[in-house]
Image: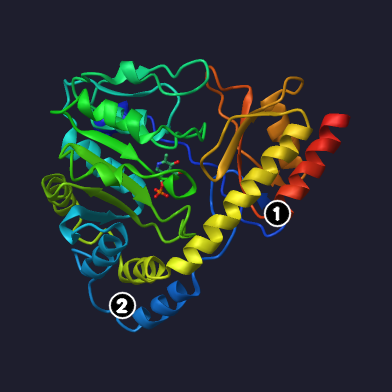
């Protein structure tokens, strides 16, 4: 604490990101990155764009918004892009939630939501997940200030059906409902199909997971043009150029390579199903995952110690010291080879 800090700086409790140890010998299964490189078209587009770096990027990122709109079958005025979905979420908190009106999100969900709430002075209630870690839909009825929740949920990986999302929207017609779909490409249908019916629905997404672009920092939101306009107003009051030229060109190219996207996503889902069996054979209880990670617990092993031991053997996974989930590990789905190695190392640790 410093005497020159603003009240905002003093009250904030920053998010702690997963460890970024990028040594090649490390198997990194702790931040839900994609184990495959991005589409080769991304590299080509970035290369072409380098010669234009003397010019500011498009503040409206038209080419990228158009590519996303085409893929989602929506008009381009239903799309907003920013520097990672974290920035989309931060802008959304500013655009839609008011200090003094309590918002709701699940007690176990993305740990950035309480951080933004404190930063922007927005009171919040955490709606407890059921014992099975599924959403308690009744708990989201008539939320005073609005709702935000991830689907599939993080860090559980559990997917809520569109019927459930619709129930939440019906119970909150005049409040913003933000569905954070960071992991939707590994799951079932997206709530984006409901956008035409609900003008209070904002769907946020990222290219960091299914498009292998965590390092490029591109996130986006889909929603009614009235919501998109609010996000643009906030962005333009903050920084007109949140996405640089390389990010816009690279991400647009990724959205235009549907074949590569489908192939890598399919591979990850196959590896996920295989890894569930491997972990099950070692005695883990694995929650049903619709994401690119697994959330699991072992009846005889302390999760935090397991996480440390894995790190000692060169494998990073994530442990959260939080009530209800302190016995769990979140393990990103890597390649088949990485998951085989994980399974071998875990069996050695557990047998000791
Ligand atoms: C639920 C959820 N939302 C948003 C994000 C942020 O993604 P991005 O890399 O686009 O900022 C993450 C990242 O892990 C996430 O787990």
Which residue, given by chain and number where applicable, does mark 1 sit on?
336
Image x and y of residue 323, in percent: 53, 17
Q: Is residue 79 left or right of residue 252?
A: left
Task: Name which residue lies at 19% across and 33% down.
Answer: 176
145 in relation to 158, above or below = above
Q: Within 8 Å: ligand 1 and the Cβ of disc 1?
A: no
Quadrant of the drawing holding the C terminus: top right
Task: Name which residue lies at 31% across and 71% down.
Answer: 245
317 in relation to 206, above or below = above
289 in relation to 139, above or below = below
Image x and y of residue 279, in percent: 72, 36
Image x and y of residue 135, in percent: 41, 23
Q: Most extreme residue toward the front, as rendered?
A: 163
> Answer yes or no: do the residues labelled 2 and 1 have beta carbons within 8 Å?
no
Which residue, given by chain and number where applicable, does mark 2 sit on?
53
288 in relation to 69, above or below = above
User: In this view of the protein, can residue 7 be seen by the observer?
Assistant: no
Whichever of callouts 2 and 1 sits on the residue coming sooner in the sequence is 2
Q: Badge 1: how crowded within 10 Å, few (<14), some, or many (20+)?
A: some
Q: Which mark is residue 41?
A: none
Mark 2 or 1: the one toward you: 1
**Nearest the eye: 243 or 201:** 201
Task: Point out the quarter of the image occupied by ligand 1.
Answer: top left
Quadrant of the drawing holding the N terminus: top left
For label 1, the SS is helix
For label 2, the SS is loop
């Amino acid at each position: 604490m410093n005497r020159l800090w603003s009240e905002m700086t003093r009250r904030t409790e920053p998010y702690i990101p997963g460890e970024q140890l990028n040594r090649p010998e490390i198997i990194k299964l702790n931040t839900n990155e994609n184990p495959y490189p991005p589409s080769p078209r991304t590299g080509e587009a970035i290369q072409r764009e380098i010669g234009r770096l003397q010019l500011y990027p498009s503040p409206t990122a038209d080419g990228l918004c158009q590519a996303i709109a085409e893929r989602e079958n929506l008009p381009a005025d239903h799309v907003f892009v920013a520097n990672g979905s974290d920035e989309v979420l931060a802008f959304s908190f500013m655009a839609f939630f008011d200090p003094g009106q309590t918002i709701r999100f699940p007690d176990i969900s993305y740990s950035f939501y309480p951080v933004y709430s404190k930063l922007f002075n927005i009171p919040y209630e955490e709606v407890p997940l059921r014992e099975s870690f599924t959403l308690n839909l009744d708990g989201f009825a008539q939320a005073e200030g609005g709702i935000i929740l991830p689907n599939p949920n993080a860090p559980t990986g559990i997917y809520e059906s569109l019927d459930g999302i619709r129930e939440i929207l019906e119970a909150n017609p005049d409040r913003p409902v933000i569905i954070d779909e960071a992991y939707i490409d590994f799951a079932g249908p997206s709530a984006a199909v409901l956008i035409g019916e609900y003008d209070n629905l904002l769907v946020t997404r990222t290219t960091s997971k299914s498009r292998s672009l965590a390092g490029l920092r591109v996130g986006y939101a889909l929603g009614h043009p009235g919501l998109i306009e609010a996000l643009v107003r906030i962005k333009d009051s903050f920084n007109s150029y949140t996405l640089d030229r390389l990010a816009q060109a690279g991400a647009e190219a990724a959205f235009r390579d549907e074949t590569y996207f489908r192939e890598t996503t399919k591979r990850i889902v196959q590896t996920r199903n295989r890894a569930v069996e491997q972990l099950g054979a070692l005695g883990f209880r694995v929650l049903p995952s619709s994401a690119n990670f697994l959330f699991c617990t072992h009846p005889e092993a302390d999760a935090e110690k397991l996480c440390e031991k894995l790190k000692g053997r060169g494998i990073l996974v994530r442990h959260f010291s939080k009530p209800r989930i302190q016995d769990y590990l979140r393990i990103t789905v890597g390649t088949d080879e990485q998951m085989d190695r994980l399974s071998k190392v875990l069996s050695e640790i557990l047998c000791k």
